[in-house]
Structure formats: C-alpha cells, structure tokens
Image (cartoon, rainbow, N blue to C red):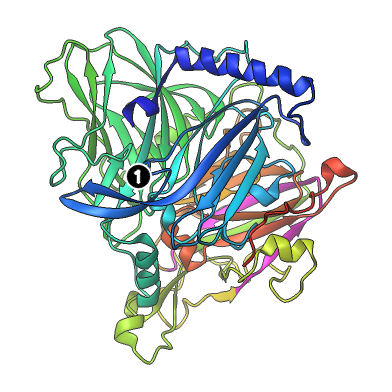
Amino acid sequence: MANQLATSGILYLWLNLLIMNAHRMSVMGFIARWPGGRATRSYDFKVQTTKIEKLCNTWDIVTINGMFPGPVIYAQEDDRVIVRVTNETPYNATIHWHGVRQRLSCWSDGPSYITQCPIQSGQTFTYEFTLVQQKGTLLWHAHVSWLRGTVYGAIVVYPKTGVPYPFIYPYEEHIILLGEFWLRDLVQLEQSVIASGGGPPPADAYTINGHPGPNYNCSTNDVYKIDVVPGKTYLLRLISASLNTEHFFAIANHKLTIVEADAEYTKPFTTDHVMLGPGQTLNVLVTANQPIAKYSMAMGPYMSARNVPFQTITSTAYFQYLGALPNSLSSPAPVPTFNDNLAVKTVMDGLRSLSGTPSVPKEIDQNLFITIGLNVQKCTSRNPQQNCQGLNGGVMAASMNNISFIKPNISLLEAYYRKINGYFTEDFPGAPFKFYDFVNGAPNNAPVDTNSLNGSRTYVLEYGTRVQLILQDTGTVTTENHPIHLHGFSFHVIGYGTGNYNPDTANFNLVDPPYLNTIGVPVGGWAAVRFLADNPGVWFMHCHLEIHLSWGLSVVFIVKNGQGPLQTLPHPPADLPRC
C-alpha cells in the first residue's frame, strides 16, 4: 500500500508516455467518444468484503479490490475515465467521484437515490466521465449508507503533457488519506444510530492511509511512513476521507506550504498546520530541512460542536529522514486543540486562487439564503427509551432552511428525466421561512420548537444562471463548522465571517477567492459562494459529515437544459441500475 500511495517523477513520465500513445489512438478513431477526452483511462472496481487485522481485532470491511484504502485513479487533464464497478457484497453500493464536475455526465455522479439507484449485490455499472479542465487531487468514495468509511481512494489528475506545476517541482509525491475506523459493520451502525434517534459513537481510531499509528492498541507497527532525503522538497496530496469528524494535520518541526485546494491551484501559503473537513483536499509542499531524525505526522480532531463525543487520540505517521535510527523516538507533531476555531480561520484566510481559475461572476441572477443546522424532532415512538435518545428525549435531525431532505426510493434524476411524478417537489425555499438571530437567538427548547419539515424538495435553476449562495450556520441545537459539498460544480468562496450574515457589512473578495467544491461554513458564522449553473442535471448539495447527511442536511438543485446538445442532459446509460 505504501508503494502504491507514493508516486514520483518516474510515474509521471510513464503516465505521460502512456497517455500520449492512447491519445494517438483516439486521434485515429479507435477510442474517441463524446464528450471527447484526450485519452481514455479504464479501471475495474470490485466491491468486496475483505478481512483485515486492526486494533487487536480481525474484522470484515467493505473494500474495492480488497484494498484499504482503495486503488488510486490516475489520469491527466481532459482525460476520459471509465470505471466498471461490480458489487460482490451483500450491500448496496455506489461510487461518487468527489470534485469531478461531471460535464454532461450527471448519470455517473454516484449519490444513491439522487443520480442513480444503488448497484445491488451481483450487479455491475460502468461510470464514465471526462475530466474537463480539471487537474489536481480529488477523491472517490462510496455514496450509500456509511460505506465510505472504508470504501474510498484518491484521484490524481496530472496537468497536460508539457505543462509544469506552477510551483517548485517536488522530489517525490505522496498521497495522505485521513480516515476514521470503526470496529463495527458500518451499514448496521448507521441503521442503529438512526433507529436510536441519537448521535453516533466516536470512531475507534483515526487513520493515515489506513494505519492508526502507535497511539492505539495493537498498532505499534501499524504505522504509515515516508522516507525522505535531507534537503529535498515533497508534495503531499492531503485528502480527508473521514466520516463524521474534521481533522487538523501537522508535521513536527516542518512548515506546510499550501499550493492547491480542492484540485485548484492557490497562491502559496505557508502554515504550521492545516484543517480538512470530510471531502476536502489540499496539496502542500514540505521541505526536509531539519536535522536528521524521525518526525511525527499527526492528525487530530477539530470539533466545533458542543456536547458531541469524539475520539481524542491522535493518529500518527512518520516523516523519517534517511540516516535516522529506525527505532529512535519521533518528535511529536503539535496539532491545535480540538476547538481552536482561530487556527481554522487562519488557514482559510490564507487561501487565494491563482490566476487561470474561472472568473468570478460579478453579477448574479439568483441570490439564495440557506440556513444549515441541527434539529430535534418531537418523539412519536411508542418506545421512547429505544428510539428517542436525542436531546431532551427527542429525535435528532438536520436541515437546510428548516427542511430535512428525504431521499426518494428511486433515482431522483431518473424521475426528473422521465417525468415521473410523485417522488420530489420543486418548492425548496430560496430563503428561510423567517429571519431572526440565527446564531444566538435560535430556539433550543426541544422538542417544542426545534422541529424541521420533511420532504424531497428541490430548487430549479435555468441553464446559465449566475447563483450566489449565502450559507448561514444556526444555533438551534449547537453551532458547528459544516463542510458543505456541492456536486457537479466548483464555486468561488467570495466571503465568510462570524455571526449572522449582514449584506451591509460583509466583505467580498471578487478578485482571487478560492475556487472549491467543499466549504467549511464557520462555526456560528456564514459563507458566501458563487457559481455558474452551466451543467444540466440533478445535483446534490449536502453536509459532508455523514451523520448530518443521514439526518437530512441536504438539498438538490435541478439545472435545466440549455440550447443544443452541449447544454442538454444526455440520455441515461443502458446499464443504469434499477431500484
């Protein structure tokens, strides 16, 4: 696994040669297809149950091709990617290609019951998409139940042949996947948590590339390590595949220089630590400029919510200089305290997009205001001790504009495309039902006034609409940093702040804002993003903390067709799974 996750310039050159050859074939007409890619990269994913030894236990987990983490998808900008997924487990499965903008390929986006029915046991589905004007570090993961706790992997998209990085060329590149691990069946875990009405238990461990590190039981040798040459600079592709927790990451005595966020180049920003919410990626440069020794790489929790249990033990890997004694003690990596909101803000303040990213829409056509937060539903169970373990004897929920999204039992995209009535409505409100002090004055006397409405409500956008979203955190139950992910698009993060959003005092950056696909809406604060709705289809927007998604913190945007075939949702693939 360590060899597979470490790539060097040799791999890059090999990939370029392979892709140039494939490109020649596509020019000759052998593999060209619409919408065209420069070359085609094909992968075969088998969803399997795999036995592993972890944390003093032998345990069955769901994997791709028996690998944990899963295989890396390697490609180049504008390549066509084809992944054949066969489900050999008893569970439903789908794969989401997180951050891939899916130009005219909404059918391959992957969220269950949104763009497809799950791939059932014994079935196969082939995902096809083109990485149109995309390069950098992304990830793929399961998007059904909580299977993405073990079903995940990296997507590495290199620039076009002959196009250099806009920063110093690294001596080596390494993928760093941050995860959480449970000694539980994750499908059953989600079912039991939802049935209880309460919150989830903490993870049994945090992991770096699948390894808990020496701070956990039976894990002294279950440690990821990077061997480094003194004086050389390394590119670390950081990916958060965590399920329910956000995480800090740091390397003892070393600076991290951020050069990319969510697969978009940024102006270099140097820091002691970074924070990633689930789904977020960062590329950082690290120079081995310290005395020869073994240094810790640590991931520790960032928990901004109040009264939420979480795993407090950090996961540790090693950044080990050649020449260091193998059994020497490692220098500890100080990560910020678990609730250090300023440490998070400092990093976000440093993110600025590099020239070459799409321009920010200066004018807007739709201005949406969306509150995000938790709710407590009134207990209606005949067995409240078993089913109403939420705050004050209620049932936990989450919502946008006080509406908890309910997934239909068929694919919403298919219902929209085939005009099947009764599975969703088009009446998601573009603003809250009422405005008040969302952060400080929110109702919190459950279960009287903390209920949300339920429904499969969508918001419809005309093709080409210039959209501004104001995402406002609320304190109905607790304020919290929410990593909000939008499928099908990246967006410009033009502003953010603490407290309630005020258009008269908000400062917007319309010059070089970061261009992301997942934004951590600040705890007790707001974020403003803009994007151009130029990709027809049905697109999920949700909190990437999996428990919040299960509780309903999501919404669906429908982008209507424009004019002509390049602005029209294609017909569904022949092997689209059936519910």
Return the x and y of residue 371 as percentages of the image width and height. 56, 61
Asked if 15 appears above or below 180 in the picture, the reply is above
Whether 460 is among the magenta residues is: yes
Please tell me whether mark 1 sits on a helix, a strand or a loop: strand
Between 76 and 363, which is closer to the camera in this rendering?
Answer: 76
Q: In which quarter of the view is residue 440 placed? A: bottom left
Region of the chain picked out in magenta, as a range: 455-476
For the C terminus, give its image quadrant: bottom right
Left or right side of 364 for 197 = left
Q: Quadrant of residue 114?
A: bottom right
Residue 247 quadrant:
top left
Tell me the residue at 33%/36% (across/down): 209
Q: Residue at x 28, y 20 (%)?
A: 254
Q: Is 339 located above or below residue 238 in the figure?
A: below
Residue 125 lies left or right of residue 328; in this view the side is right
Camera sees residue 257: yes
For the view shown, which residue lies furthest in the bottom direction?
Answer: 382
